[in-house]
Image: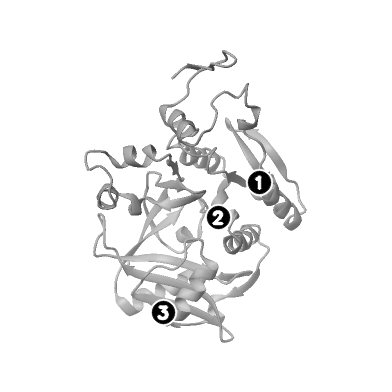
């Protein structure tokens, strides 16, 4: 829509209905001329991320670089790496369309640059911040290296798997039927979780649900060793969805381990509630109606009527690993 400020008569073009509703329900102001504090500014979280990366890497780092029709927060040309700090408000549907983060990822990948999306609510969580810093060290090749051939592989108990994955994976633990660990000198250094998919096209097939490593350690050949163990033991192929907010589209560990690429999924969305991204599955229409919402309204209408809004990630890569 095009709207006009009643106070200063400033005309604002191309403002979405979603943003108008959000501003209304949250007592925010639309006019940037009367309320300049509503304009985007460099956040504390973005500054912190920049400081962390500058403290880790001594090579050339470019800030707020305009390239490929976008602006990127942090660019490391020597490593073909870029980092984007995504504030939940400014990177939501209020300002970005649902393909924005995916298209930006693809544009940088086409120039052989891995663009990593780091989300505000993850960074503001002290435990997840440590995981992010460890992963930044990993992509900068600053972690200690061990070799999978020197590791012992075996299945582990639920308690050990849950503690490890909650500590070292951004998405946390998920229920799984098969939990595989790598041990180096009696220390657990990697965990992968497998289970049968309960929904969607691949329902009933095995899926690699989580895979993560101990902070500060890269296990060369670790994923390949775990995959071989699974195939030898369970005689089954399986699928895996890889988070494109972090993974390189062209040269990632899944491709190196022998996975077959199936397709690049559409971006998934979350609802932003109280400053955090919440899984959309918790807010499907049947659950909202059960909680007292009007059955004649859609999920979108119910949630946006309460002042909530969506945010879209950069999608997932779907891979298949065939049992040879």
Marks 2 and 3, how far apart in space? 25 Å
Which residue has dot 2 on it?
A: 122
Asked if the residue at tag 3 contacts the one at tag 2, i.e. Cβ–Cβ closer than 8 Å, the answer is: no
Residue 244 visible from this viewpoint: no
Asked if the residue at tag 3 contacts the one at tag 1, i.e. Cβ–Cβ closer than 8 Å, the answer is: no
Nearer to us in this view, 253 or 12? 12
Q: Is residue 128 left or right of residue 51?
A: left
Q: Position of residue 143 (x, y in %)?
A: 66, 67
Q: Position of residue 310 (x, y in %)?
A: 42, 41
Q: Position of residue 169 (x, y in %)?
A: 51, 65
Q: Earlier in the sequence, mark 1 or mark 2?
A: 1
Q: Residue at 41%, 79% (x, y): give it.
A: 158
Residue 203, quarter of the rendered image: bottom left
Q: Position of residue 41 (x, y in %)?
A: 66, 36
Examine the rendered structure and indicate whether residue 206 appears above or below residue 136. below
Q: Earlier in the sequence, mark 2 or mark 3?
A: 2
Which residue has dot 3 on it?
A: 158
Q: Residue at 37%, 47% (x, y): give it.
A: 265
Which residue has dot 1 on it?
A: 46
Examine the rendered structure and indicate whether residue 151 appears above or below residue 20. below
Marks 1 and 2, how far apart in space? 12 Å
Residue 168 visible from this viewpoint: yes
Q: Residue at 54%, 26% (x, y): give it.
A: 30
Residue 207, quarter of the rendered image: bottom left
Nearer to us in this view, 260 or 216? 216
Marks 1 and 3, how far apart in space? 36 Å
Examine the rendered structure and indicate whether residue 290 appears above or below residue 105. below
Q: Is residue 270 left or right of residue 53?
A: left
Most distant residue in the top direction: 9
Q: Secondary structure at mark 3?
A: helix
Q: Secondary structure at mark 2?
A: helix
């Amino acid at each position: 829509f095009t709207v006009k400020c009643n106070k200063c008569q400033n005309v604002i073009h191309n403002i979405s209905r979603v943003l108008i509703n959000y501003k209304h329900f949250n007592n925010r102001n639309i006019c940037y001329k009367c309320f300049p504090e509503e304009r985007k500014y460099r956040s504390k979280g973005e500054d912190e991320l920049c400081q962390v990366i500058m403290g880790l890497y001594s090579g050339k780092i470019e800030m707020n670089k305009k390239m490929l029709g976008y602006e990127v927060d942090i660019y490391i040309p020597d490593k073909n790496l870029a980092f984007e700090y995504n504030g939940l408000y400014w990177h939501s549907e209020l300002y970005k369309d649902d393909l924005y983060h995916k298209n930006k990822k693809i544009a940088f990948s086409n120039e052989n640059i891995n663009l990593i999306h780091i989300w505000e609510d993850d960074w503001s969580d002290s435990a997840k911040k440590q995981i992010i810093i460890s992963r930044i060290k990993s992509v900068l090749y600053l972690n200690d290296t061990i070799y999978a051939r020197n590791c012992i592989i075996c299945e582990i108990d639920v308690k050990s798997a849950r503690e490890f994955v909650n500590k070292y994976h951004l998405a946390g633990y998920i229920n799984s039927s098969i939990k595989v660990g790598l041990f180096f000198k009696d220390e657990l250094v990697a965990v992968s979780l497998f289970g049968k998919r309960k929904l969607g096209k691949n329902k009933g097939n095995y899926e690699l649900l989580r895979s993560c490593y101990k902070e500060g350690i890269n296990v060369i050949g670790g994923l390949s060793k775990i995959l071989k163990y699974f195939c030898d033991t369970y005689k089954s192929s399986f699928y895996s969805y890889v988070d494109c907010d972090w993974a390189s589209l062209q040269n990632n560990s899944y491709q190196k381990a022998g996975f077959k690429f199936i397709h690049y999924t559409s971006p998934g969305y979350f609802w932003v509630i109280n400053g955090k991204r919440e899984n959309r599955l918790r807010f499907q229409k049947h659950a909202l109606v059960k909680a007292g919402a009007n059955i004649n309204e859609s999920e979108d209408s119910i949630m946006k009527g309460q002042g909530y809004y969506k945010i879209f990630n950069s999608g997932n890569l779907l891979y298949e690993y065939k049992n040879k």
